[in-house]
Image: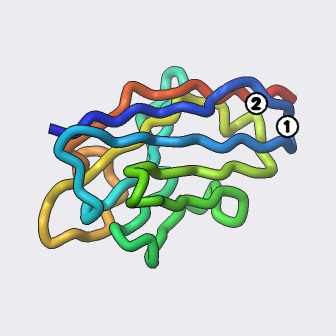
């Protein structure tokens, strides 16, 4: 089993920045594809960004492209999401997820992930 714990959420004004972290423990593997999703009240969980095990390949939702950066430090079993130029529509609970399937591939749907964190709230005020 893999445990994922997010941190770094909070309240920020529009145009500000936040950095989310996702710490992995348990049966961790640096070869897992890892991603960030978010869910706003009354909406479905949506894809934000994904990174391959090496960190060399990333993919973003159009809504965050150019503003968010996903990265990982396998030595620390930690993934990050740097969020800049935040907008009120970015307000949501942000979840990190890990996909343990092999061979690894980029997945942008929630059902493709095996492990999930509990989420961290990000609120952007206008």
> In x, y percent, where is residue 57?
44, 76
How many neighbours does mark 2 have within 10 angstroms: few (below 14), some (14-19), or many (20 or more)?
many
| Local crowd size for mark 1, using a 10 Å CA cut-off: few (<14), some (14–19), many (≥20) | some
Q: Nearer the viewer, residue 8 or 103?
A: 8
Residue at 34% from the left image edge and 42% from the top image edge: 24
Which secondary structure, mark 1? loop
| Quadrant holding the N terminus | top left
Q: Residue at x 76, y 51 (%)?
A: 84
- Up-down relation of residue 40 to residue 115 (above or below): above
| Quadrant of the snapshot with the C terminus | top right
Please say if the residues under marks 1 and 2 sit with CB atoms less than 8 Å apart: yes
Q: How is the image coloured?
A: rainbow
The CA span between labels 1 and 2 is: 6 Å
Residue sitting farthest toward the front: 75
The mark found on residue 14 in the picture is 1
Residue 22 in the figure: left or right of residue 29: right
Which residue lies at the image location 46% right of the left edge and 47% below the top edge? 36
Relative image position of residue 125 (x, y in whole percent): 82, 26
Up-down relation of residue 60 to residue 38 (above or below):
below
Q: Which residue is mark 2?
A: 124
| 65, above or below 82, in the image | below
Which corner quadrant of the image does residue 25 belong to? Answer: top left
* 21 with respect to 34 (left or right): right
**What is the x, y in percent for residue 37?**
45, 43
Q: Where residue 86 appears, x then y in whole percent?
A: 77, 44
Mark with earlier residue (1, 2): 1
Q: Secondary structure at mark 2?
A: strand
Residue 17 in the figure: left or right of residue 118 = right
Q: Residue at (78%, 44%) from the top-left corner? A: 17
């Amino acid at each position: 089993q893999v445990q994922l714990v997010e941190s770094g959420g909070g309240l920020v004004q529009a145009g500000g920045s936040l950095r989310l972290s996702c710490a992995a423990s348990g049966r961790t593997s640096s070869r897992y594809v890892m991603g960030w999703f978010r869910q706003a009240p009354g909406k479905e969980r949506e894809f934000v960004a994904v990174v391959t095990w090496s960190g060399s390949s990333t993919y973003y939702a159009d809504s965050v492209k150019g503003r968010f950066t996903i990265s990982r430090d396998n030595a620390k079993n930690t993934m990050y999401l740097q969020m800049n130029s935040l907008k009120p529509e970015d307000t949501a609970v942000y979840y990190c997820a890990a996909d343990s399937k092999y061979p690894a591939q980029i997945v942008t749907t929630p059902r493709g992930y095996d492990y999930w964190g509990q989420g961290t709230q990000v609120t952007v005020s206008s």
